Amino acid sequence: MGEVAQWRLEGDVAVLTLDNPPVNAISAAIRAALIDGVKRAGSDPAVRALVIACAGRTFFAGADLREFGKPSVEPFLTEVIDTIEASTKPVIAAIHGTALGGGLEIAMACHYRVARPDAKLGLPEVKLGLMPGARGTQHLPRLIGVERALEIIALGDPVGATAAKDMGLVDTLADGELVDAARAVARRVAGQPPRRTRDLVAAKVDDTVYSAFAQKHSRKFRGLDAPPAIIASVRAATELPFEEGARREREIFLKLRTGPQNEALRYVFFAEREATKVPGLEGVEPRAVGRAGVIGSGTMGSGITIALLSAGIPVTLYEHDAAALERGTAHIRQTIAGNVATGRMSQAQADAALAGFSQARDMEALAGADLVIEAAYETMAVKREIFSALDAVMRPGAILATNTSYLDIDEIAAVTARPADVIGLHFFSPANVMKLLEVVRGKATAPDVIATAFTLARRIRKVPVLSGNAWGFIGNRMLAVRRTQAEAMAVEGASPAQIDTVIEKFGLAMGPFRVGDLAGLDLGWSAETSTGSTVRERLNEAGRRGQKTGAGFYDYDENRRPVPSQAALDIIAGFARDNGIKQRAFTDAEVLDRLLWPMVDEGANILAEGIALRESDIDVVWLNGYGWPAWTGGPMFHARQTGFGEVARRLEAMGLPVSDALRALAREQAG
């Protein structure tokens, strides 16, 4: 059977065990071994049933990543699926670990499915801009019905084996040893006609089922090609004979596979994995983090506390103001209770999390923590005062982290006698929800401190990206450029509503003016020092400070819905007159170019300065921290697809500067 497969016969049941570490990816060798094994079972009169199992930690966990983006190699997965299903002798899948993508398609082609209770099954192809292409959209509705099939395929999230059994995807849960349980099923059904999934009927449903599903998930599906394609393919399972439905599935799959979204989303998949690879950390052992402290009980501090507690890390929350501490504590408890109510956590997990939570108004209470994350007011004076106090309190080897969004990590570290232990951990709000964690390296930060930050990020389910120490790091430095251009266009005559609409149509959830109003226009502003020298200052002076005051760049109704504001437009127009700026109309294409390409130019500078290790790291920051539409790959990928030379040309056409760094990328791309 070759290097990847083992065959053994026990009585009249054959067991074919596949082994392709670490996750039994469905390589060409695996596909060939499956076909050979099924044919061998069919031709051997001593075999009355076949069990397909996998060695190692999992059943087939999906496609072989080494084959991504390359020409398909025979035998194709569809041939494997059809060979298994056509077997004249019963074939039983023995599932442990995860059966994902093609792995679940293989399992559904088998005539019976036996799974360990802790196994997970799913079809996550949608997350790469794809859908199942080897009978998955035809088999699954026949096994579990249209509505559940849509949920599993179009959302891409796996289900546990117990739930899978309840819905009919799994036949038997193994009480003891998995292959023994599968052999028992094989002996029971040996000699019976195979129970082929393709022969089941996928019951038709009313058209409103499809439209209601699409509407329910419209925000999640916005801009994506795969979900409507999946809906169309699942519908084919109920309206066409199996062979015709399978052909229709293949047509739709191949169209998605050759489309731009699949290329972009595959890039994103690999970019997030590449971001975890930091040169110089090979073999570096992270420090243990058994207990954490958080300083500041506001929105960020509370969110960070929830993220840590949810991962099973005990936390002491420090806040000098008693009322603020109580508000933060109430928010933490309320959020965890809400997670239980929505099924994100079990009650036992919530109880364990809260059992590890404590409050403190004395910094000495943090002394036993392995890691302290400061999330206090964003001024250097406050940060330095806190870190000076922490330096005196914390044990040697404890990690001191700041959640600063912009400030100089080295200046903060300089007030301590342990700059090697100081690092930036820039969470994004709400910190318990947003995936990105910018890990900011100071000039003295120790390698094992960086390694610890990356280990912690994975533990709390964040996507970490290393950043050098520069104002705004990666994301906020580029965001500041976009904000500058957006506000300049508003003064020059494009309305905030037009600018926001253009970027939202591009795929971001909120435009820069809606974001500004949500955050509060008075961040960093005070009436005592206001000079009216910017549009924001004039809006603040007029009492228009964002959603919280019911007015900012927009007016807000009682439900905080934004309404274009004539008063704001008048303030902006007055500012333009006072500064001799003639207003004009903008096309949507002009607006989009001016929002996107200056950001890319700044991204090129960030890369050239070594603040980001890779173009893809910049994209991972924007994808996970700022809601950049994943189907475009990120700002740098999008620019590379457009052509860096073309980006430079458009910047010049708008009269905007082009950095040497961007010109260098353009030359490199031109070859």
Image (cartoon, rainbow, N blue to C red):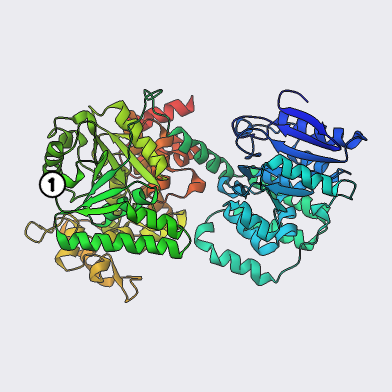
Please give the name of the residue rendered at 80% of the width and 43% of the height, measured from the top-left corner.
Answer: 91
Q: Where is residue 107 in the image (x, y as percent from the top left)?
A: 72, 45
Where disc 1 sits, the SS reads: helix
Q: Is 366 rendered above or below residue 414?
A: below
- Would residue 576 be visible to someone looking at this image? no
Give the residue furthest to the left.
Answer: 528
| Residue type pointed to by label 1 | Val
Closer-to-camera residue (351/632): 351
Closer-to-camera residue (338/7): 7
Q: Where is residue 9 in the image (x, y as percent from the top left)?
A: 82, 32
- 549 lies left or right of 622: left
- 115 lies left or right of 273: right
Q: Is 291 rendered above or below residue 203?
A: above
Quadrant where the N terminus is found in the figure = top right
Q: Is 324 rendered above or below residue 79?
A: below
Please give the name of the residue rendered at 46% of the width and 38% of the height, measured from the top-left corner.
Answer: 272
Q: Position of residue 321 (x, y in %)?
A: 14, 58
> 10 Å neighbourhood of mark 1: few (<14), some, or many (≥20)?
few
Q: Mark 1 points at which residue?
A: 382
- 238 lies left or right of 357: right
- Would residue 376 be visible to someone looking at this image? yes
Image quarter of residue 350? bottom left
Please give the name of the residue rendered at 33% of the width and 29% of the height, measured from the top-left corner.
Answer: 608
- 391 lies left or right of 459: left
